[in-house]
Amino acid sequence: MSRKKDKHKLRDASAGTSTIQPSRPTSGDDREPVAERRPVPVLLIALLVALVFWGELYVMRHGGDIGGEKGAFPAMVYFPFKSYAEIPKPPGGAAEGVKFYGQYCAICHQANGMGIPGQFPPLAGSDWVLEEGPNRVIRLMLNGIQGPITVNGQPFNNAMPPWRDIMDDAKVAAVATYIRSTWGNKVPPVKPEEVKAIRDATADRTSAWSAQELLALPTK
Ligand code: HEC
């Protein structure tokens, strides 16, 4: 069959259909197509809620040990510990230290430990805080410190209030531990017993320390 013949046939076919009129006029209907907004069926929402609820129940039943039932992922401790009680708490309650630091110290030394230039010396990177032992830091926390002091090469001449009657041994230890282990500071924690020993040894002291006095004492 040749192509020419083919074309001819086609034309014939179209000629035949051209007599059939479309049932609806193609022009003159200028209605815009619109997207209908139908509300999501309530049943579908209810089904979803039920599914999520069931999913949660499933996770609770088959997950960790919840509601007195053993789950697929039981709460467990790993070697070398055998129970939760054996896991050591952060020494001196460093977690508590953040709270008390915010409560008692941040107003001057700032939450980021940077202090305020010319007024309040920084604790972050401070050579006073980073001393190996807390001998001087505990003293200045208990009784305060005033007069000229040099911190990281910067001179200050101001006064810090005493905390002896406001903070107990555990609080002083927690805050001292916190300032010695945050903002990049990295020196050993302070124990409440160390605070108690210094509190007792300096029980008679009522005035603030001077930097000079503290520098004459050993760091630990
Ligand atoms: C009212 C402001 C104020 C508060 C609150 C305060 N300090 Fe201070 N602190 C100072 C000032 C001022 C100095 C410097 C004193 C001086 O000039 O002799 C200082 C010095 C220090 C120093 C030694 C210097 C240094 O920067 O390392 C340490 C450590 C310190 N404070 C820790 C604390 C801790 C811990 C607390 C919270 C328990 C605290 N301070 C609360 C004002 C304050």
Image (spheres, rainbow, N blue to C red):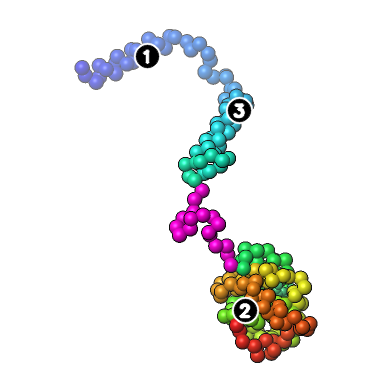
Quadrant in the picture for residue 102: bottom right
Q: Quadrant of the N terminus?
A: top left
Q: Which of 12 and 133 lies nearest the eye of the viewer?
A: 133
Q: Amino acid at mark 3?
A: Ala
40 in magenta: no
83 in magenta: yes
- Name the main secondary structure of what is drawn in magenta: loop
Q: Which numbered dot is residue 173?
A: none
Q: Which residue is mark 3?
A: 46
Q: Around disc 1, counting alpha carbons within 10 Å, would you say few (fewer than 14), some (14 to 19), or many (20 or more)?
A: few
Q: Which residue is mark 2?
A: 134
Which residue corresponds to the image point at 51% horizontal and 41% vertical from the top-left?
Answer: 70
Q: CA distance from mark 1 to mark 2?
A: 102 Å
Q: Quadrant of the C terminus?
A: bottom right
Give yes or no for contact between labels 1 and 2 (Cβ–Cβ under 8 Å). no
Q: Can residue 16 be seen by looking at this rendering?
A: yes
Q: Which of 127 and 83 lies nearest the eye of the viewer?
A: 83
Front tag of 1 and 2: 2
Where is residue 86 drawn, in percent x and y?
A: 53, 59
Q: Around disc 3, counting alpha carbons within 10 Å, would you say few (fewer than 14), some (14 to 19), or many (20 or more)?
A: few
Ligand 1: quadrant of the figure: bottom right
Which residue corresponds to the image point at 54% horizontal and 55% vertical from the top-left?
Answer: 84
